Image (spheres, rainbow, N blue to C red):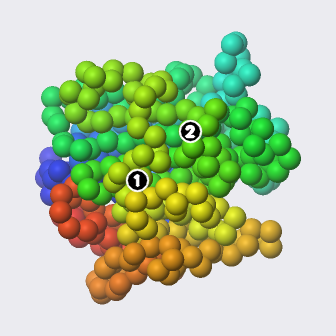
Amino acid sequence: MKQTPKWAQTLQSYIWIFNVGRGLSIFIRTALNQGILYDFGCSEKFSPSKFIEEKLLPYLDEYKKCKVAQTIISHPHADHIAEISCLASRDGKNPPFYSSLHTCPHDKTEGSAKPEALDWDRVKNPKGSEDNIKLYKGLYDSRTLPLQTISYESSRTVPNLGYGLFYVRPPVVNDIHPKNDQDYGNGMSLVLFYRHGKHTVLIPGDITPDCLKLILEEGNGLEKRYTVFDRQKKEDHPDWHQRTDNQPSLKSLLQNYGLSIFVAPHHGLESGFSEGLYNSIKDKPALVVISEKRHTSDIDGSIDNRYQCADGSSGLSVDVEGATENKFSVSTKNGHHILISLEGTGGSPKIFLDKNPEKLLQKIGG
């Protein structure tokens, strides 16, 4: 029997942002040792799902008999679902990544839910991604609406641990972006906010500034889900995880707790920069993380230089392949995988970068 590694026994949160070239792949190990997968990018050189299955999954606690508590696809663009096959059944059995919460933008096309579904004719993907789109539709066809976060049912409590999903209903995204199909697809992105004590992380997928503005202003069409891993909170707000109610707004969370780590939307491109977000934060993020896109087109623009200087963050001390550097932002551009460690108490988040993810695992006792 394998010995349980140190990281699986701690009350720290770990967030992996994998280098997948063009795309996004993030794994969150909560302080309660539950796993959340956000997006399924991959590259020819690296498979996040293989690394997670071999090195992380065996040591996670189960959630409703599943090793992964929740799988989230921010939006169905090809670079965010490149490795979606890891969710497919194997020999008629559930895959290791099967979860009770399969979460993605609403795409139910039957019954009363149909008017709320995303418009697949407006979700543009390159040739060659047809099989993955078909698999995506099949995998998520049986999921249960409404979208949810984890239903907290544990006897264990970690103080000030919680996360939420914020998104705009597809018909409203259509109204916001009636002509630009790329913006329509990106605007669908599910935005994830994670808090552990004094540390916070925002993962906005590829959301557009206009859709993020609606979320921040709590406009018509906003949906919220929120879980606080505390028994009293669950008793006081039993439906926060499954329907929009009086959950805290994203703006109030940013104003009250600030932002430790900001994963820049749309791969850090200029088109995704949100003045409204920066105006909503208690202070500048401590660090910006960029999952950098490759082969950008002329219309994409460049990486926004505000993320890479004091205009965009206050800066943190970062471990880059064993050497300490002071950074305003870090990126996967040079082949680095990124590991974020949150203790939830005093001090700053610990950030590690390395081209070999197993060396990152060693940093936390893997």
Q: Which mark is residue 255?
A: 1
Give me the residue at 47% from left, 48% from top: 251
The location of residue 250, given as percent across then percent down, is 46, 45
Crowding at mark 1 (Cα within 10 Å: few <14, some 14-19, many 20+): some
> Residue 362, relative to residue 199: is it above or below?
below
Could you say which is closer to the camera, residue 67 or residue 261?
261
Disc 2 marks which residue? Answer: 218
Amino acid at pointer 2: Glu
Name the image quarter holding the C terminus.
Answer: bottom left
- The answer to whether any part of residue 31 appears in the image is yes
Crowding at mark 2 (Cα within 10 Å: few <14, some 14-19, many 20+): some
Element at label 2? loop
Q: Quadrant of residue 351?
A: bottom left
Task: Describe residue 357's horizontal placement relative to residue 306 as left or right.
Answer: left
Could you say which is closer to the camera, residue 330 or residue 169?
169
Could you say which is closer to the camera, residue 168 or residue 296?
168
Element at label 1? helix
Gap between marks 2 and 1 measured at Cα:
14 Å
Give me the residue at 70% from left, 12% from top: 111
Q: Do callouts 2 and 1 mark residues in contact (Cβ within 8 Å)?
A: no
The location of residue 53, given as percent across then percent down, is 37, 50
The location of residue 45, given as percent across then percent down, is 53, 68
